[in-house]
Structures are given as C-alpha cells and as structure tokens.
Image (cartoon, rainbow, N blue to C red):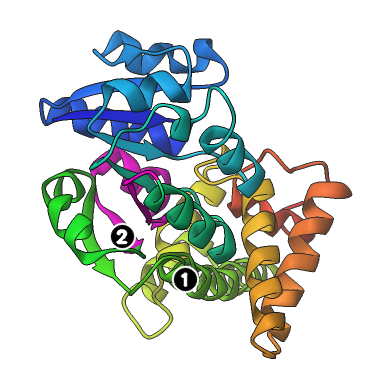
C-alpha cells in the first residue's frame, strides 16, 4: 500500500518515520521542501503538490497546522481533490473544526472518495514512538480498512461516529489538557515558592491521585529548562478557540477553557512565545519567568 502524507512538521514526521519503519512506501509533500529533508533522507519520496500525492497514493494523510491550511491542501487546482480517484481513502489528522470535517467528507463522497477526520493526541513523543491516540469520525468500512496503518502509528484508535465526530472528541481531549496544563503550572510554581524540591514533588505526585500526562511529560522538560515545541503554543490557542466556538454552538459554558485560552494568548502576545512548547505556560508565574 502506498501512503501519501502531507505535512512534515513534528507530528507528521513522527508518523512518516513509523510508516517507513513498517516498510510502507511513503510519498510526502510540504509547503517548504527543506522541512521535509529529514524524512526524505530516510526514504520518503517527494511529490510537488497535494494533487500529485493523491494521484500516486492509495491512502492520503494530512497533518498540517490550521483549518485554513487543511482547506488549502484539499481544494484548488493543485489540491488533493484534484488528484483523487474513486475508492480512495483520505484521512485528515489535523486538529480542525467539525464543520470542515463534514464538508470534506461530503466533497469526497461526490468523487467516490472516503474522507475521515482523525485528530490525534500524544504529542511529539507519541508521534515518535507510534503511541498516539487517534479519534476518528467517518465511515466504519474505511476505519476498519485502515487498522493496519493505525496500529503502526497509534496505541489506541476509536471511531466516534460520522464525519466531524473525531474532531469533537479531540475538543474534549483539549479541554482536559487545558486543565492539566494550568494545574501543572500552578503546582510547580507553588512547590518552588514553598521551597520544596520540585523534582521530588513531581515524582511523589506521579504516584498518586494528582498524576496526569502533562505533569509526567512536561514537568521534567520545565525543570530542564526545555521549552522547545513538542506542541506549539500557537496551535494550542487554535484548538482552545475551536473548542470554545463549538461550546457556544452547544450552548455550553466552559470557564476553565476560556481562562486557558486567555492565558495562552497572553503567553503568545505579551511574552512572545507563540512558537514555544505549551509547557512554557509556567513562564506566566514569577517562579519560572
């Protein structure tokens, strides 16, 4: 099976490397070719446009930044839909809007193409290790057909229903992550202000009820003064705004998520850390500024 992947950022590259390791033929496209060089060196094959990717691949995966980026890869003369063929499966793994996911599924169906929305959780570590969690919306037949691929890149893959449902599940995930990231920042700041050994605190909390993924994965990075992006602040802001927009449509108030969006926006705008990793949220507290 030939797999096309559009987007060779942190997440896309991790996925591509695991597919190559599993001996799949992988074709890639990225807006900046130089950013794809690492996966090209490992055996991926370059294509000049999303349309060309779709014309040579059996399955196409997109992993880009924002909903507008997703749309630009699918539509137009050089877009995916200009090169697809009947019976093909296309998977958008970008965290995007449920509305766009539904639109892509409808557009694909008109061409005999199945489009799944399949955003992921697990960050750069999950992408690198093939242990992502994948939340899928779309047709079950296509979902079942892609199980061999999902098993290469993920530890858990769940179908939540029709088009857009995967994106809704990802919003639920990001709402929880928002809470754990703020909790981590306040926990570590409090521990440092109280004069505790913060590393010891992390180890202790990791064995009790306060244990969570953010604390386990980002706490050690903060203590190592490592704020490189496994997941960008700017992309988390995008996700939080999508979640808040969807909550408004559902007539649901999410005060904690709204606070997280305000704080991460401050981190990006006032602290100029839009391109840092989300763990940089601790820099809003003086103990880590």
155 left or right of 116 in image: left
Q: Residues within 10 Å of mark 2 (few under 14, many from 20)?
A: many
In which image quadrant can residue 20 be found? top left
| Residue of label 1 | 173
Residue 193 image position (x, y, % from top left): 70, 69
Magenta residues (range): 111-135
Residue 164 shows in this picture: yes
- Where disc 1 sits, the SS reads helix
Residue 258 image position (x, y, % from top left): 74, 76
Q: CA distance from mark 1 to mark 2?
A: 10 Å
Count of marks, rendered view: 2
Name the residue at 56% across, 50% down: 222
In the rendered view of the protein, which quadrant contains the N terminus?
A: top left
| Residue of label 2 | 133
202 left or right of 279 in image: left
* Sequence-earlier tag: 1 or 2: 2
Name the residue at 32% across, 48% down: 126
Residue 54 image position (x, y, % from top left): 36, 28
Q: Residues within 10 Å of mark 1 (few under 14, many from 20)?
A: some
Residue 226 shows in this picture: no
Question: Are the residues flagged by discs 1 and 2 in contact, CB closer than 8 Å?
Answer: yes
- Where disc 2 sits, the SS reads strand
**Depicted 152 relative to depicted 214: above or below:** above
Residue 246 image position (x, y, % from top left): 64, 75
Farthest residue to the front: give it: 110
């Amino acid at each position: 099976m030939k797999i096309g992947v559009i987007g060779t950022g942190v997440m896309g590259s991790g996925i591509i490397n695991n597919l190559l390791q599993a001996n799949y033929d992988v074709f890639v496209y990225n807006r900046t070719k130089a950013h794809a060089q690492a996966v090209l060196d490992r055996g991926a094959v370059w294509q000049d446009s999303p349309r060309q990717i779709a014309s040579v691949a059996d399955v196409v995966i997109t992993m880009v930044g924002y909903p507008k980026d997703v749309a630009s890869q699918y539509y137009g003369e050089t877009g995916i839909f200009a090169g697809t063929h009947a019976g093909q499966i296309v998977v958008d793994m970008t965290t995007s809007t449920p509305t766009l996911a539904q639109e892509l599924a409808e557009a694909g169906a008109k061409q005999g193409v199945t489009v799944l929305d399949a955003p992921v959780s697990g960050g750069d570590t999950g992408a690198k290790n093939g242990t992502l969690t994948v939340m899928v919306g779309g047709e079950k037949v296509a979902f079942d057909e892609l199980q061999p691929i999902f098993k290469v890149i993920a530890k858990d893959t769940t179908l939540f229903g029709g088009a857009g449902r995967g994106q809704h599940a990802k919003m639920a995930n990001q709402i929880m992550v928002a809470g754990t990231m703020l909790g981590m920042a306040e926990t570590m700041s409090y521990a440092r202000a109280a004069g505790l050994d913060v590393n010891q605190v992390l180890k202790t909390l990791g064995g009790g009820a306060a244990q969570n993924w953010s604390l386990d994965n980002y706490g050690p990075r903060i203590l190592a003064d490592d704020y490189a992006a496994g997941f960008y602040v700017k992309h988390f802001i995008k996700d939080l705004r999508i979640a808040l927009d969807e909550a408004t449509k559902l007539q649901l108030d999410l005060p904690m998520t709204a606070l997280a969006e305000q704080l991460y926006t401050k981190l990006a705008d006032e602290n100029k850390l839009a391109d840092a990793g989300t763990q940089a949220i601790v820099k809003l507290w003086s103990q880590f500024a």
